[in-house]
Structures are given as structure tokens and as C-alpha cells.
Image (spheres, rainbow, N blue to C red):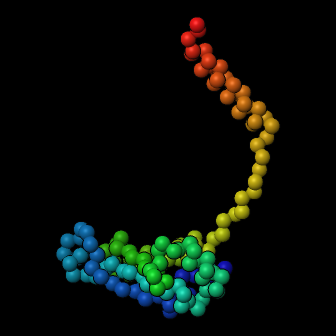
């Protein structure tokens, strides 16, 4: 199973910058936007199988070097944005490591097949009645 997000902290680097959007004077002087950077391939916490699975699932979100970048600028507080980006990071890890249930092939029941064919027959009769009689 996956360890909590706090276990990944030694592997994560944070970078702050000024957030865009409204905020008055605060937005011009405080670096409240937080960007999380994590190198998937260099992670010592994950197994090789987990890394392979994550490489497949997160292919569109990783840079060419295997770096995952997540940012948060939802709040005016840098600390709150750091908490938000860590929560997003952990959710992303959980979703990428979840394996889908294998689909079991099933056959439609006899009554379902009968109902479908009856419906098709009704529709064809309805359309046949629309034709002009010569």
C-alpha cells in the first residue's frame, strides 16, 4: 500500500512564486503560489512495479525527465497552498496506483434478447405503416 504524503517529503521540492489573479496589494508582494516538484524515477519509496504503473497512468502529466509538477494558488496563504498541493499529490498517487477491476464478459438474458427483438419488430411495423399504399 501507499505511504502517506508526508513520507514523500524528502523527495519533494517546493518552489514559490507570485500568484496570478485578483488579490489587491497582497498578490503583488507575497509569493503565495506553491509548485510541487517530484521526480518519479528517482523515488526510493516506490517499488519498480509501482513506478512502471505510474509511468503509464501519468504519462501526460510528467515532463520528459519524469518530473511531476503540481501547483496551487487557490488560497492567499502560502502554507494553505502547500497543504492543498500536497493533498492533490497524494490523491494523484492513489488514483494512479489503483488497478481497475477486470471486466467479466456476460451474455444478455433470453428475456432481454426477446424484448429487444420485439421492440425492433414494433418499430419496423410502425415505419411500414407510414408507407404509401399503391
Name the spot of residue 90 as percent of width and height, x first: 53, 77
User: Could you say which is closer to the camera, residue 66 or residue 5?
Assistant: 66
Q: Quadrant of the C terminus?
A: top right
**Measuring 75% from the left and 36% from the top, which residue is drawn there?**
113
Name the spot of residue 111 as percent of width and height, x first: 78, 35
Name the spot of residue 23 as percent of width and height, x first: 24, 70
Task: Decide: is 119 above or below 73.
Answer: above
- Quadrant of residue 126 in the image? top right
Name the spot of residue 35 as percent of width and height, x first: 38, 81
> Going by the image, does 98 lie left or right of 10?
right
**Measuring 43% from the left and 84% from the top, which residue is drawn there?**
37
Residue 38 appearing in the image: no
Q: Quadrant of the N terminus?
A: bottom right
- Quadrant of residue 95 in the image? bottom right
Residue 10 appearing in the image: yes
**Measuring 72% from the left and 27% from the top, which residue is drawn there?**
118
> Going by the image, does 15 lie left or right of 1?
left
**Measuring 23% from the left and 76% from the top, which residue is drawn there?**
27
Task: Decide: is 112 above or below 43.
Answer: above
Among all residues in the image, which is located at the extreme front? 134
User: Could you say which is closer to the camera, residue 129 or residue 108?
Assistant: 129
> Going by the image, does 28 lie left or right of 119?
left
Among all residues in the image, which is located at the extreme top? 134
Task: Decide: is 109 above or below 65.
Answer: above
Amino acid at each position: 500500500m501507499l505511504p502517506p504524503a508526508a513520507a514523500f517529503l524528502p523527495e519533494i521540492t517546493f518552489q514559490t512564486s507570485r500568484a496570478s489573479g485578483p488579490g489587491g496589494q497582497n498578490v503583488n508582494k507575497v509569493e503565495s503560489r506553491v509548485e510541487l516538484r517530484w521526480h518519479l524515477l528517482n523515488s526510493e519509496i516506490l517499488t519498480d512495479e509501482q513506478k512502471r504503473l505510474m509511468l503509464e497512468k501519468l504519462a501526460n502529466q510528467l515532463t520528459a525527465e519524469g518530473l511531476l509538477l503540481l501547483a496551487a494558488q487557490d488560497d492567499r496563504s502560502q502554507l494553505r497552498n502547500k497543504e492543498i498541493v500536497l493533498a492533490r499529490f497524494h490523491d494523484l498517487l492513489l488514483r494512479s496506483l489503483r488497478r481497475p477491476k477486470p471486466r467479466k464478459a456476460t451474455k444478455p438474458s433470453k428475456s432481454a434478447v426477446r424484448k429487444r427483438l420485439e421492440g425492433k419488430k414494433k418499430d419496423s411495423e410502425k415505419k411500414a405503416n407510414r408507407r404509401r399504399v399503391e
